[in-house]
Amino acid sequence: MISRRHFLKIGGLTASLSGFASDLFSQSNSALPQAALENLVAGVKPLGPEDYDARLERARALMADHKIDGLFLPGGTDLAYFTTVSWGTSERTFGALLNRKGGTVWVCPAFEKERAKELIPEGQEIRIWEEHESPFKLIGGIMSDLGVRSGRLGIGPSTAAFIFYGIRQDAPSLDLVHGAAVTESCRGTKTAKEIASMDLANKITKLAYREGFKSIREGMTPRDLSSAIGAAHQKLGASGSGGPQFGSSTAFPHGSRAPRTLKPGDVIMVDGGCRVQGYSSDVTRTIVFGKPSDKMAKVWDIVRKAQAAALKTARPGATCESVDAAARKVVEDAGYGPGYKYFAHRVGHGIGMDGHEYPYLVKGNMLKLEPGMTFSNEPGIYIYGEFGIRTEDCMVVTGDGARHLGGMEAVSIEQPFS
């Protein structure tokens, strides 16, 4: 996810100790030319009522296809996607019941009603339950009033177990089914407006990395670099971050807790992102502070070729599995196999409102790609005790192939952005 996971406006940042990069890494920060960073998010048009109406219409159509009479969504991303309402999770059941017969009906703790009314669109029904009452019986009552007392109730994928079992106990006439057929099918493909937000989010993160890389110096900590990247994101109009790892810590795909300071010859891996209008970016770049060894450069090239193979394979009708296999073949053919030995994870995850979401590019997933699906494309090779290399861009499936979001693709270990 995003929570876990910055470049000069020249032809690219050179990470060797020759030419311009030698000057870059040896100059003090105050001596560096300051590129003007401007807010790129100002003026972006947010989603409007028509967008949410279209989502609900599609949800109802899918509910009809799967013979689902109602769909309960608790606080979380699915709720925000369909209703605009952002609400956290707790032991008190709150959520929306989408249905095929009328407007959305809300289930709300009584003492939270006034707060909920500030968020819920005007005219939608809110049903309350007091502290001693069962919200699960309330849900059963709503279904009964809709004429489907013994109907099929879809349960949103992120629903807590206590809610599922509470409904099953207090509304036993309902047939509880997995709601993913609706939520994942809707969220799995993105509209042009959603893709535009993701394009911008990925561009901002890459610009922030490029800017943050100006601060690279011997003796700095990962926190120092992360702070520079975060500050650049802020100037560009987004709240974002980067999670840097130095040296042998880069062999841990999600980083190591071992304290490190930067020294010449260290691999630097940065993985992070931001959000624009609620839509995520996820970008990884790997460079070297100083001159890369022949092995580092070779492994970097293998990883980049694997990423290119995955991008080429991704197209409408291709399976999720085939995209992972294309990248993995490049890595294995280069001697870094078999299986997950060095390339230790799937090639990609879905991305959108959540940093990691359905669907996943992994062996065994025979789901066929469709235009508008968005994924990370992030092959890596990790050699414990030495270093790790990963290059990551997000991509969107188009009508006849796929493209990386945000541009600025990596060129070489010495030029992390085109």
Image (cartoon, helix red, strand yellow):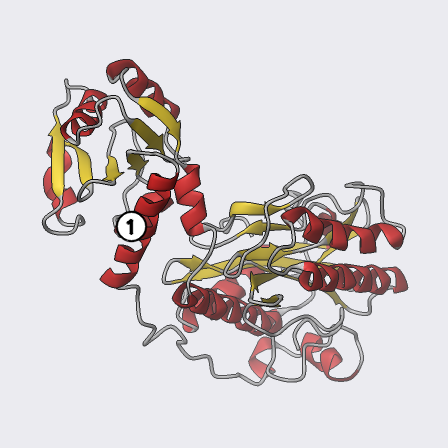
Q: Residue 8 or 59: which is nearer the viewer?
A: 59
Please indicate whether residue 182 sits to the left or right of residue 313 in the image.
left
Is 209 placed above or below 268 here?
A: below
Q: Position of residue 355 (x, y in %)?
A: 49, 51
* Residue kind at label 1, given as amino acid type: Leu
The number of callouts visible is 1
Q: Is residue 240 visible?
A: no
Please indicate whether residue 288 sits to the left or right of residue 150 in the image.
right
Please indicate whether residue 244 sits to the left or right of residue 308 in the image.
left
Quarter residue 52 falls in: bottom left
Q: Position of residue 148 (x, y in %)?
A: 22, 27
Q: Which residue is mark 1?
A: 56
Number of other residues with Cα within 10 Å of mark 1, as a class: few under 14, some 14 to 19, many 20 or more: many
Quarter containing the C terminus: bottom right
Q: Residue 40 or 371: which is nearer the viewer?
A: 371
Is 112 placed above or below 347 here?
A: above
Q: Position of residue 296 (x, y in %)?
A: 83, 61
Residue at left offset 39%, top offset 24%: 161
Q: Is residue 24 visible?
A: yes
Q: Residue 308 or 399: which is nearer the viewer?
A: 399
Q: Position of residue 252 (x, y in %)?
A: 70, 45
Residue at left offset 61%, top offset 68%: 400
Residue at left offset 86%, top offset 63%: 298
Q: Residue 172 or 95: which is nearer the viewer?
A: 172
The secondary structure type at the circle numbered 1 is helix
